[in-house]
Image (tube, helix red, strand yellow):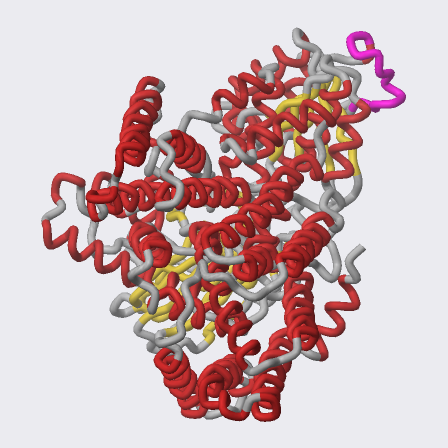
Amino acid sequence: MVPVALIQRLAAVTPAYAATAVVLIGGALITLLCAVVRDRRGVPRVLPGIVFVIAATASLWPLSRAGTPPSAVWAALLLAGAALAAHFLLGRTDMPDDAAAVPASPRASLVYLIAAGVLAGIILLDNLGGYAGWLVNWESPVTNGFGDAFVAGQGVLKYTAQRFLWDNGLLSAGHTSLFYGAPTYALFHLIGFSTWTLRISAVLATLLSVAVVYAFGRRFFNPPIGAAMALALGLNICVLFYGRYGSSPAGTMLGLLLALYATWAFLDRDQSAWWMGAVCAAALFAATLQYAPARLMVIVLVGYVMAHAVYHWRRLGWRRAVGLLTIIGAAAGVWEFEHFYHVDSLFLHARGEQFFEFLQAPDQIQALFGKQMIGRHIAPNELTWVDKLTLLIRVLQTTVPQYLGLIMPSLTTPALGAVIEYDPPPLQLYYAPVAVFIVWGLMHSIVRIRSWRHNCLLALVVISSAPLLMTNRVDSHRGMLLTVPVSMWAAFGIWEAIRLMRQAKVPAVVQHVLAAALVSTVVCNDVNILNYDHIPQSTSVPVVVGEVESAPGPVALGAMWNHREVSMVQLGMLERMWRNRDHVGMLLPEGIVHNAADEGTNADFATRELLRMIQHEHFTVLLAPAENFRKLGMLLQQRGVRVAERGTSQFRVMRMDAGAGATGVPDTQVKPLPTIALQPTPTPFTLESGPQISLSTLQPTDVTYGFMPPKIDHAFTDGPLVMGGVTYTHGIGMHAWCRMTYAVPKGAIRFQAIIGLSDFVRDCAAALVTFEVRDDKDAVLFESGPVDGTTPPRAIRVDLHGAKAITLVVTEGGNGRDCDHANWAETAFLLKR
């Protein structure tokens, strides 16, 4: 077990950044001391590198603390830049080639590889299957995807064969990937369904990636660089996060590394066998069967192979030419294969969240960005070149800062558990102090730009980043694969540091001690970020799982609560079915569930469908939370269905079956409800009358949000605005966090609304928000205080005090965004009479 609590206590006293800064600066000073004592004439040669490490490290941590003047940080950065330039200028005459022999023991490199694998394995496997409460966001739909195939009786071989067809390339569709989806489905068949089997394939893919990147670095550079690559990738916080929680990026990274290895092996002049073209083509195709960002990098690699062949056509040779033709022929064959199955259009589709799809469907722009990027609604055939250019500029104004925020070092540590609670997670592509080595390694590549290895790596990052900037957002999900080249540059920087210490004649044992200390600080940072201090416990999952286990036959679950917890229940249903194929477990379609709920407008269809399942197919139907389905329960009870309401005071489940005679479960075990008492229709709030302007008729001047955009005259889920049992026609449905700004109409003196949580999340323990109304100077005009499932809706009236604009704000309440469905009903500006 990893001592998580101890590491978190140490991090509270001394942040990992501070410890890393001490190691880096201390190592630089030790290097300088060794140079002065053991080789004084060599001091000028090593001094620029030492100054770079000290200045760059100081700018990242000691000088970045509160109270330090920004001028000091900029001065340190300028000094670091000048020192780095001097380091490479002084070393240009003795700059060795990457593949040159390095006086290092291969055994030492293997030791570091083993250390990288062991440390990564411990972090990845620690309590892998024991995380309670719920699954992370993308594991939920993945669970459903595996479940549909298993319930349908699909075999492993057929399931794997289908993974060779392209899909939308979504992270949440990881079950359709080759290197994660196929082995995970095979494990489900072999050893059953659990959070462990859901995640272990991602763990194995990550550990294999560490081994592949070591082989890659050793083959194309040298053993120390290979070992450094293994450590940099294996201990990367982003890589560990996606490897620890079952996801397609973990398998995608493995596929990309294999494709990169095969491509470089084909380009290597010393290895020109024609059959390597076939290997390269197969690896490139396999890398496209994953998450969409890998497909961008595959396109870059294919283009680089072609450009390299044209540039070096005199040295092509017949073997390389045959291999090149094999790659071209394979690409054409793959495209025809995917076209035959009508999935070729999905290669770069990615759910339409990219610029060229915006041009085809501009009506989707507001839903993706939360505002009209051009300033008005435009049909596809009405877009002019000016409109298209304006849209592109506005998209880049959104995504470029996001991209820079992702790739620049950040010293802000996410709150404990935040990387699991939020989607996308607040993750950087690397541990901030490693930026010292990344910048060093980037310069290492730039000064060797004539080498095809380095210009290929630079092209891979630059060209594949451009399409990312033309999407609706850039985050750790979409940028995760950039950890591969970033880790390689970090390894080049580490190699430069190794060369520097050898030139200064630093004893080998001291070098290894410094490496161990640096690795220890990185590991502590990883453990601190990836783990909760207190794991949240679900009040609903044990209740529903208990009902599933007690049912005698097939079970169908209709759920209207947290989808992460629903997926935990589904894993339990699938495990039950794996033990006994007659015990089918399935989720009811959303359409039936919503129509079956109290607010459904097509309840007759849901009633007939559930009645058929219960009386003819002998399903036990579970509907939760129970209070949403009491009217349906009454109707089915009148038609001979046994209806029981079970659970705890925190969470109730409606259980329906065909009765004791059909199920063999006596009424003493499942006590049926004699009647279902329906609550009287609540009385709506009385609002102020008189001249007013509804916000439903106005356009907001600005909309920003953290998860999904708000909805006008609908709840966040597109359903009706229901609070306290009352359905409201007009208003705004938000999901925290969210801000909407409206210009105050002329003559308006007050703002009024009815605020509260949606009735459909009141039984979710995580539901907690605050409502605020702010003026154009961001002064708070109204603040609700904490609003949770026990807080009744309320009417508010807010004096505007001459404000020119107001902003409606919903926050996450400090505990994450789950179930934070907040409604503003009957929103209106009241005018002066």
x and y percent of residue 690 in the render? 35, 59
For residue 743, above or below residue 634: below
Q: Is residue 663 magenta?
A: yes
Residue at 54% from the left image edge and 56% from the top image edge: 226
Front residue of 573 and 697: 573
Quadrant occupied by the C terminus: bottom left
Q: Main secondary structure of the magenta part?
A: loop
Q: Which contiguous range is marked in magenta?
A: 661-672
Image-based side of 616 in relation to 57, left or right: right
x, y percentage for residue 47? 48, 87
Q: Residue 557: in sight, yes or no?
A: yes
Does 566 sit left or right of 726 as displayed?
right
What residue is drawn where x is 55% and y is 32%? 181
Closer-to-camera residue (227/779): 227
Task: Give yes or no for residue 819 being in the magenta stretch.
Answer: no
311 or 791: nearer the eye?
Answer: 311
Residue visible at 31% across and 63% down? 449
In this rendered view, identify the residue nearer to me: 584 or 501.
Answer: 501
43 versus 119 height, above or below:
below
Image location (x, y in percent) of residue 240: 60, 53
At x 51%, y 56%, the residue is 736
- Residue that extends furthest to the right in the rendered view of this protein: 668
